[in-house]
Amino acid sequence: MDPKASVLVNAVPPYGHILCSEKWRTSSLIQRLRYEGVKIFFEEELGVADFHLPNKMCLLYVSECDIIAGNGYKRKLVCYRNARRSFQELVLVERTRLSEQYFSDVQKFVVFDLGLFMLPISGQTEASQLITEIVLEDSSG
């Protein structure tokens, strides 16, 4: 692994900021985070994680599309778990009307099989609210 990439995989952003995988740059989640006053640094070398937060937490986002498309998300989750950084790891999983029938299996895999913390969310709007609350709470105290 490139030394720069190794540093970025373990990078912690300053308070009030997040590190975000480049693939999220044009998403509604990012637009909402900016609107709420969160400063965002984009990076291609975050490893498997989608977001790094200033409280040494990293997030992986499993979308409704990932779940419905099949078991491909499982490989991503295993890689995320195996990375074992010095971060608290959290998996955000979209629980929607379309993904509801698969949700129990996803939850069992994430929590019981992999031992990761998981939080169901309704979509990118709720995810942005959660991230904003974590980032801005940490920057105020």
Image: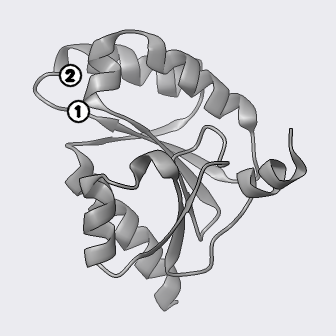
Q: Is residue 78 above or below residue 31?
A: above
Packing grade of label 2 (10 A; few <14, some 14-19, many >=20) is: some
Between 31 and 16, the one nearer to me in the picture: 31
Query: Would you name the residue on which mark 1 appears?
Result: 95
Residue 63 marker? none
The Cα–Cα distance between marks 2 and 1, rounded to whole angstroms, is 6 Å
44 vs 123, left or right, is: right
Question: Within 10 angstroms of label 1, few (less than 14), some, or many (20 or more) residues?
Answer: many
Quadrant for the N terminus, please.
top right
Residue 83 lies, in percent from the top left, at 73, 36
SS for dot 2: loop
Question: In this rendering, would 55 be left or right of 60?
Answer: right
Q: Measuring from the top left, give residue 66's x and y in whole percent.
A: 35, 23
Colour scheme shown: one colour
Residue type at mark 2 is Ser
Residue 18 location in percent, x, y? 52, 67
Snapshot quadrant of residue 63:
top left
Answer whether labels 2 and 1 touch (C-beta < 8 Å): yes
- Residue lying farthest to the left in this orientation: 97
The furthest residue to the bottom: 140
Could you tell me which residue is drawn at 25 percent across and 76 percent down? Answer: 35
Which residue does the numbered mark 2 point to in the structure image? 99
Q: Which amino acid type is shown beneath numbered disc 1?
A: Arg
User: Is 102 in front, or is 7?
Assistant: 7
Secondary element under disc 1, as helix, strand or loop, is loop
Does residue 39 sit above or below 58 in this rendering? below
Q: Which residue is at a point 20% across and 43% down the rendered structure image?
A: 122
The residue shown at (55%, 26%) is: 77
Q: Is residue 24 left or right of residue 54?
A: left
What residue is at 63 percent from the left and 52 percent from the top? 88
